[in-house]
Amino acid sequence: AMLLRNQMSLLAFCFAVFVGVVVVAVELTEEQHEHLPDFGDPKVAARLKCSACRASALEAFDALMELRTKRGGTRKIKEHEYAELMETMCEDRIGQYGLQLRSNLPTQKFSKDKSISRAQGNWAGRYIMNICGELTTDYEDALITNQFHNLAHFIETMCVREMQVCDRRSVKDETLGDELTAEFHEMLQDAEL
């Protein structure tokens, strides 16, 4: 009886988790669709690209650091390791991102913060995955070369210098990225480009 009760509790928990995941992925309301950012507007497109680049650079930095740690700090990454790592990163990690909702309406900030409502799917998911793919394929050498810098320098280098989708102000704009902590702000101020 105890085993059956534990199995039933586990089943109920799994169902609750499953239902919770489904709730997050519900379709956007008509009002939310109407308020999705218009990436046809150059200013909006610039903010979306910067936010998507910052998220992609953050995830690439973390993925590269995890691989180095796993390999015992070895600096040289083999090409097939890089390709597999970046493909997985763009699909799995970036797939968790969505446009942050504020007052239940989409903003121009990509976020994976599960404590904040996000609009996922639609063009937003494809958009950030495309930016991630562009970053990891077109800027592979820069990613590998700059992976040993601190996070702030890495993001600024990748999104301002390399991809040129952020300017010095937008790369520091708290409304465009999750990575902005007090520590990140300090690193940005200390970073020399």
Image: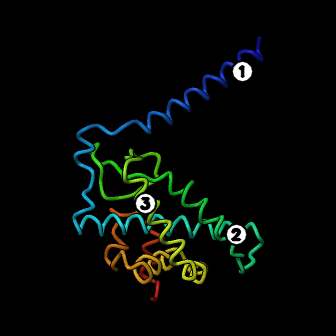
Q: Which residue is mark 2?
A: 81
118 vs 128, nearest the viewer: 128
Residue at (46%, 88%) from the top-left corner?
Answer: 192
Q: Which residue is mark 3?
A: 128
Secondary-structure class at tag 3: helix
Q: Nearer the viewer, residue 100 or 143?
A: 143
Q: Position of residue 8 (x, y in %)?
A: 67, 18
Most extreme residue toward the bottom, as rendered? 193
- Whole-angstrom CA distance, mark 3 to mark 1, is 40 Å
100 up-or-down from 60: above or below: above
Q: Could you tell me the amino acid type at mark 3? A: Ile
**Residue type, numbered disc 1:** Gln
Residue at 59% x, 84% y is 145
Where's residue 154, x and y in %? 51, 77
> Residue 78 in the image: x percent, y percent?
72, 76
Is residue 175 left or right of 159 when viewed as pictured? left
Q: Residue flagged by tag 2: what amino acid is it?
A: Glu
Q: Which image quadrant is residue 147 in?
A: bottom right
Indicate which disc, 3 or 1, sits on the residue closer to the N terminus.
1
Say if residue 16 shows up in the picture: yes
Q: Residue at x 35, y 63 (%)?
A: 176
Q: Which residue is mark 1?
A: 7
Image quadrant in which the C terminus is located: bottom left
**Other-residue count near label 3 (Cα within 10 Å), few / some / many at <14 / 14–19 / ≥20:** many
Q: Are marks 1 and 2 in contact (CB under 8 Å)?
A: no
**Spatial CA span between label 1 and label 2:** 40 Å
